Amino acid sequence: MWRALCKASGGIAVGVMLVLGVAAVATAQDIRDFEDIAASPVTVTPDASGRFAVLTVDTSIDVACSVVYGTDDGFGLIAVDADMNGGAHADHHPVMGGLEPETDYLYRLQGTAPDGTIYISDTFTFSTPAAVSLGTNLALDATIVGVSSEWSDAFAAERAFDGDRTTEWSTRGDGNEAWVEIDLGSPQAIGDVIFHTRSMSDGSAITARYTVTVDDVVHGPFPVDEPFGALEDLGVVAQVLRFDVDVSTGGNTGATEIEVYAPTDA
């Protein structure tokens, strides 16, 4: 049973369903249990804000997938992999946005294989935690003053500074040469920074380490701890900050979000 894949992680009941493009007409032979292709346990990991959660699961075959979720069985929200490869693949990590802290959610996952078979799970639940405030994210009001490249307007650098983990900045194959520079508008005391890497289903575009340059002084390299990043205490006063990819798996590197926080006592 698919239920055997469900588990509790950090007090969060985990169960999932990959869902995408169900055909208008499907025979019973076309619909199967998602457990038949689940190649790893499914996990749902909320971030500290309680407003986003990453669902991860591997499948034994390539499927196009999405997860539907909401506070009742009408769902109302849907998330897919923000992967420019598109189509079917086996490594799934959709980011569920639009969540509220301390709220219970229902979710279901469906996957469609290239042969038209639809794999469906039951409906399961997860809960978001109480929000943890990290202070003021100065990056939300920053101006982009330079970037190594942008894949398209849909993957522009500003997407990494919009407070939305479901959007992302992607370069045009810059790999370890990817960088973006922002201007905070005036000198600001900087506390913690967080870099959230983007990734592709083929294993490329994953940043493992990055640096932050302030007034020609390079800070780091710092490790990227996914799915929701790790706090790095910069402890400087700065107006212009440059973020460089130091080590990555190459390809269209970039970030789903880069956060720059004022010290909590500032």
Image (tube, rainbow, N blue to C red):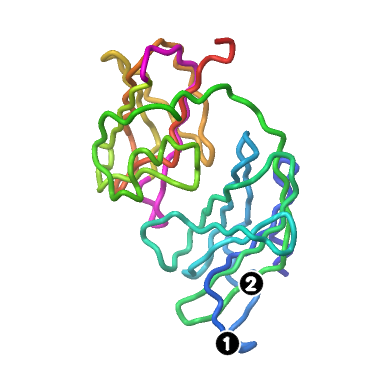
Image x and y of residue 35, in percent? 64, 69
Name the foreground residue: 168 vs 158. Answer: 158
For discs 1 and 2, the disc positioned in front in the rendered view: 1
- How many residues crowd around disc 1 within 10 Å: few (fewer than 14), some, or many (20 or more)? few
Does residue 36 lie above or below 209 as drawn? below
Which residue bears the numbered disc 1? 25
Badge 1 element: loop
Residue 120: mark: 2
Asked whether, in this view, residue 43 is left or right of residue 154, the answer is right
- How many residues crowd around disc 2 within 10 Å: few (fewer than 14), some, or many (20 or more)? many
Q: Residue at x 42, y 40 (%)?
A: 197
Q: Is residue 145 magenta?
A: no
Amino acid marked by disc 1 = Val
Q: Magenta stretch: give its range.
A: 185-205
Name the foreground residue: 26 vs 119. Answer: 26
Does residue 14 lie above or below 239 as drawn? below
Q: Is residue 191 magenta?
A: yes
Quadrant in the rendering for residue 78: bottom right
Q: Residue at x 33, y 35 (%)?
A: 247
Asked whether, in this view, residue 248 is left or right of residue 103, the answer is left
Badge 2 element: strand
Q: Could you give the CA–CA distance between mark 1 and mark 2, rounded to whole angstroms? A: 15 Å
Quadrant where the N terminus sits is bottom right
The overriding secondary structure of the stretch rendered in magenta is strand
Image x and y of residue 253, in percent? 33, 43
Amino acid marked by disc 2 = Ile
Image x and y of residue 241, in percent? 34, 22
